[in-house]
Amino acid sequence: MALDVDELLERAKQACGLSDWGADQAFRVGLQQLTEAGKTAGIPPAAIAALEDQIVSLLVTRLHFVEDENQHPEITSLPIERPLILTGLARTGTTILHSLCALDPAGRPPQTWEAESPWPAPEIATYATDPRIALAQKSIDARLAAMPILRTMHPWGATLPADCLPFLALSFVTTRFMASFYVPDYTHWLSTTHPEGIYRTHKRALQQLQWRGPRGRWILKEPQHLLHLPDLMDAYPDACIVQTHRDPVRTIPSVASLIGTIQAINKPDIDKQATGRQVLQVFGAHLERSTIARQDPNRDGRILDIAYRDTVQDPVGTVRRIYDHFALPFTEEHALRIAQHMKDQPKDKHGVHTYSAEEFGLDPEALKALAPAYRQRFELLLGEPQGQGRF
């Protein structure tokens, strides 16, 4: 039976010879929601198989995590100290700002290869030569060969800083699934509920990577954190949190274009307007829920707001402002690395990302009315940089 939870759990156990799921069973809620949504979404058989394989891989990783901590209980006592966590609606500059902060010589950004394959734990001695790097790059290259337009939308690379989606996927509570597969019921669930336990697994993944791997201040990034700000702050009470801002009239259509392109890999006949509705729902929830969470002065006081235009127009100054705000050391070496990075990675290096709101059924006037409380509060941060186009 396709997408049967019991069968998938059994496949994972058979794949690795382990059976202890540990004390934290919260992942089963998201897993159930995902599989039920997948059964009714009209996903092609080949895509169903790909989704099942992805689920089994995540379950195998969870089993290995439990086995590792049973054998080495010190893993779960490793502290995650003052992580720098960037969040903000997708396409508001989170990726470029993450890349710039990750150039900190004292920073520890997760790299794509290790975030996607955190078991076995990376080792310091072989960190730069781990065979998973080549495997991850091969997978990325295959995807880009199938969809070359993706190069214009986002940077891709096995050793580039990774976002937190792979860690959230281990809880089966992530926008990754709605981005890769057409699962509208799951998207609705993700947008309207507050699943428990997400950041226990998120933290456990970071502990896995720093156990035997490189150490340093974690430099993290993920738009989806906007859905769960209270839980994020509870998990990391000393975190340095940055929220980026840009007008949703610009960002939402761009996100729809990116997600629609990725969905088309698994469902070539994707309905773009249906994708637009999903994107509007889930990312509108990002803005609404984060704005509500920030009505608490204690939470609000822990977040620094950064306009997209400032990141683009003054990258060194913007990162310096972040570090100064949180009393983190900002070195001259870091500044020089940022300047060199911006020189080496000019805007539109791989071409221009072209799209329109209309092709995804998105009305610019309606987008202006999205999340009115968010717009009212952050209106002054939403403008575009001078002389810059969209991406």
Image: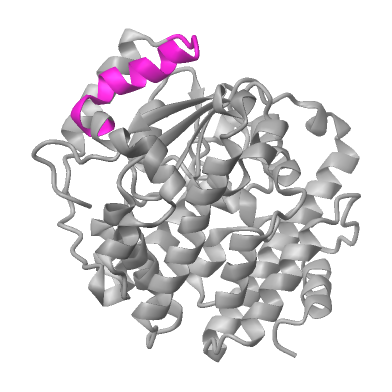
For residue 369, what is the image quadrant? bottom left
Answer with left or right where residue 149 lies relative to residue 265: left
What span is in magenta? 311-329
**Residue at image coords 23%, 57%:** 152
The mark tally for this picture is 0
Q: How has the structure been colored for display?
A: one colour
Residue 146, position as x, y percentages in the image: 32, 73
Residue 41 within the magenta-colored segment of the rendering: no
Residue 31, position as x, y percentages in the image: 73, 67
**Residue at image coords 29%, 33%:** 380
Q: Residue furthest left?
A: 387
**Residue at image coords 42%, 50%:** 372
For residue 41, what is the image quadrant? bottom right
Residue 327 within the magenta-colored segment of the rendering: yes
User: From the viewer's perspective, is residue 83 above or below residue 54?
Assistant: above
Residue 98, position as x, y percentages in the image: 40, 35
Answer with left or right where residue 172 lies relative to residue 10: left
**Residue at image coords 27%, 62%:** 365
Answer with left or right where residue 84 lies relative to residue 311: right
Is residue 91 visible in the rendered structure shown here? yes
Q: Main secondary structure of the magenta part?
A: helix
Decide which of 386, 45 is in the foreground and name it.
Answer: 386
For residue 36, what is the image quadrant? bottom right
Decide which of 285, 275 is in the foreground and name it.
Answer: 285
Name the image quarter holding the N terminus: bottom right
Answer with left or right where residue 370 lies relative to residue 230: left
Is residue 114 visible in the rendered structure shown here? no
Residue 367, position as x, y percentages in the image: 33, 60
User: From the viewer's perspective, is residue 254 above or below residue 383?
Assistant: below
